[in-house]
Image: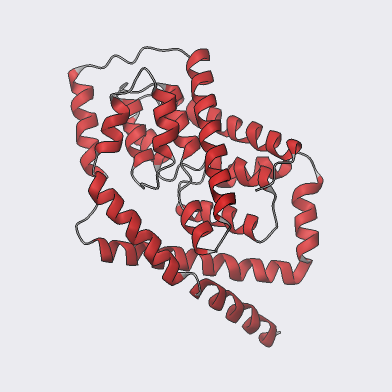
Amino acid sequence: MFDVLYDYFLDALIDSAKLVPFLFVIYLLMELLEKKAGNSFPRLLGKTKQVGPLAGGLIGVVPQCGLAAASASLYSGKVITLGTLIAVFLSSSDEMLPILISSAYPVVSILKILLVKVAIAVVSGYLVDLLFKKGTQTDQNEKDEVERSFGEYEHRSNIFLCALRHTLEIFIFIFIFSLALNIIIGSVGEENLSRVLSSIPVVGELVAALVGLIPNCASSVIITQLYLDGIIGPGPMFAGLLVNAGVGTMVLFKTNRNAKNSLAVIGLLYAIGVIWGTLIELIGLVF
């Protein structure tokens, strides 16, 4: 028994360690992007009300950690519409992109995933604004509160240490999840586990979307790894990653004075993710 657990441990450690150099380079590039861009992305979002969902979908796909959080503050301050917020949340994917790239996933497939996410985000954002049209006039106090929120998500100056810390955090998440998955697969079998998640229609999408709502980078790590390991298909993967806005959902509850409204936004986000994930699975899209 000990030998088996040791093998699981060693396999998970080796597989996770292989990703570290690639993850560090990717996160270093992301840190440079955030340092150069500063608050320009969220400020641009706040100035594009006429094309809010389109801007939200396009800007949200940029791997900038604080964007979903800043967008939540913008929505709470009535600077952007609900549709724009939903577009940003749906387009964001937290750790998906770094993991796909570091795992040498085909570039064409990555681009397809990103394009589909952006398309879903834009279409959904406009539909939400059409169904829940609401004014976005804000008073000066709300504007000041939003301005202060930008500084809360600005990056530290030492980009190398930030990239290293982020890399180590994701390495730990991947290692722990890989070890747990090795144990589970060793106990029930990969085919049996995949069959359980895909045998009953919509169940995979419902569960993946619940995991995706967890406001932690571990949720996107888990969903992406399950997809890469062939445990879940494109439908559950999209359902989970569409609703995965990182800490954006936490910031929404923190900055929005209307708790019921925040719960409604999360419920709407969850429903949209499940619907699109189910459609993708039914259509049989391959990435």
Q: Residue at x 46, y 57 (%)?
A: 98
- Quarter of the image where the N terminus is located: bottom right
Q: How is the image coloured?
A: secondary structure
Image side of residue 136 versus residue 112, left or right: left
Residue 240, quarter of the rendered image: top right
- Residue 259 screen position, x and y as percent: 41, 27
Q: Residue furthest bottom?
A: 3
Q: Nearer the viewer, residue 161 or 118?
A: 118
Figure check: 246 above or below 253: below
Give x and y (percent) for residue 23: 43, 64
Which percent across, then down, holds residue 260? 45, 24
User: Tag count in the figure?
Assistant: 0
| Residue at far front of view | 108
68 on left or right of 36: right
Residue 236 in sight from this viewpoint: yes
Q: Is residue 154 visible?
A: no
Q: Quadrant of residue 3?
A: bottom right
Residue at the image position 51 percent from the left and 46 percent from the top: 214
Seen from the viewer's position, the closer of residues 23 and 165 is 23
Residue at 79% over, 61% down:
191
For image coordinates 78% across by 39% down, the residue present is: 201
Q: Position of residue 258 (x, y in %)?
A: 38, 24
